[in-house]
């Protein structure tokens, strides 16, 4: 099914990378760990969370009769069970991640996004189709960012009120209900040729620096995901508008899948 894969991740600095990806012969996952908040009630760090969630998803995505939302809900619950005895899972700031999933089964293509990760696909001769979840960017009347742990972020009490709440935004954390809020779809694989999954550290190349998705997929076709990551870092390094307290570099991850669709014999 997957004829060629390019995947890479790059940490935003000296801290451990909080992104995570996995690729099989029929599915791929990109997770972007949410930068940790103080007093999150958990003894585990964000890399632990994304690795645990990725492993739990891998166990479930290999069952093609299970929908992606169901796979994600069970994976969230399974990870919660792993640290329920040691951590305060009622804490609204518990470690979390955004999610992008692509899966191929028979002649169909399934996708899911939760949070501001992105799934992008392209049929030859057509513009790329992009799916993401922009609810974090559409919050009504958010407060001004403040210094939280050395970077500019929304205040913790505000995030506790709007994360995984109706009218707020949704990420994978401790509540399987978040999976119901994911954006997801199914379409015929047909002539689909290329699929990409990206964390927001890579999508900023389009959203902040004005590159087109045609350009991004074209770079990936020739130079793989590492070539795209190089372009992200170059754009960030040349950006004079990044404030001192904002992240110049974010963890950035991408997976590019180039496909050969096989059809069952009648």
Image (tube, rainbow, N blue to C red):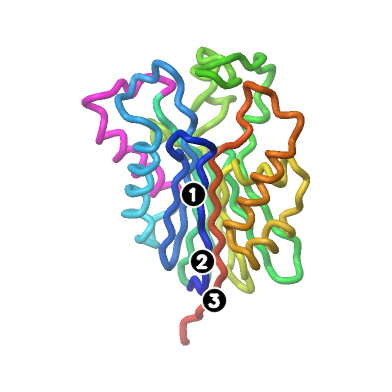
Q: Residue at x 74, y 59 (%)?
A: 214
Q: Magenta part of the protein: which range?
A: 68-93
Q: Are marks 3 and 1 in contact (CB under 8 Å)?
A: no
Task: Please provide percent x and percent y for residue 134.
Answer: 64, 36
N-terminal-most mark, 2 or 3: 2
Task: Please provide percent x and percent y for residue 173.
Answer: 41, 32
Q: Are marks 2 and 3 in contact (CB under 8 Å)?
A: no
Question: Toward the viewer: 112 or 225?
Answer: 225
Above or below residue 244? Residue 110 is below
Image depth: mark 1 or mark 2 in front? 2
For the residue carrying disc 2, how many other residues have a C-alpha within 10 Å: few (<14), some (14-19), or many (20+)? some
Q: Residue at x 43, y 22 (%)?
A: 93
Q: Is residue 262 magenta?
A: no
| Residue at the spot of label 1 | 30
Question: Farthest residue toward the bottom?
Answer: 266
Q: Residue at x 69, y 45 (%)?
A: 234
| Residue at the spot of label 3 | 260
Task: Please provide percent x and percent y for residue 31.
Answer: 47, 44
Question: Toward the viewer: 153 or 251?
Answer: 251
Q: Is residue 79 magenta?
A: yes
Above or below residue 16? Residue 126 is below
């Amino acid at each position: 099914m997957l004829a060629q894969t390019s995947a890479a991740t790059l940490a935003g600095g000296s801290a451990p990378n909080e992104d995570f990806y996995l690729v099989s012969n029929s599915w791929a996952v990109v997770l972007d760990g949410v930068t940790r908040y103080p007093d999150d009630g958990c003894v585990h760090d964000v890399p632990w969370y994304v690795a645990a969630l990725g492993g739990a998803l891998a166990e479930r995505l290999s069952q093609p009769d299970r929908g992606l939302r169901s796979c994600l809900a069970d994976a969230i619950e399974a990870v919660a069970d792993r640290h329920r005895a040691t951590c305060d899972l009622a804490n609204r700031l518990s470690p979390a991640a955004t999610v992008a999933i692509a899966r191929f089964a028979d002649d169909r293509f399934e996708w899911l996004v939760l949070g501001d990760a992105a799934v992008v696909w392209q049929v030859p001769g057509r513009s790329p189709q992009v799916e993401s979840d922009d609810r974090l960017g559409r919050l009504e009347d958010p407060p001004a960012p403040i210094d939280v742990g050395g970077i500019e972020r929304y205040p913790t009490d505000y995030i506790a009120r709007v994360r995984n709440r109706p009218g707020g935004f949704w990420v994978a954390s401790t509540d399987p209900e978040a999976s119901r809020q994911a954006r997801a779809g199914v379409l015929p694989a047909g002539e689909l040729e290329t699929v990409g999954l990206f964390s927001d550290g890579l999508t900023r190349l389009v959203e902040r620096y004005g590159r087109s998705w045609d350009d991004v997929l074209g770079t990936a076709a020739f130079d793989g995901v590492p070539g795209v990551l190089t372009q992200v870092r170059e754009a960030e390094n040349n950006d004079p508008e990044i404030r001192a307290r904002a992240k110049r570099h974010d963890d950035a991850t991408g997976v590019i899948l180039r496909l050969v669709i096989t059809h069952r014999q009648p």
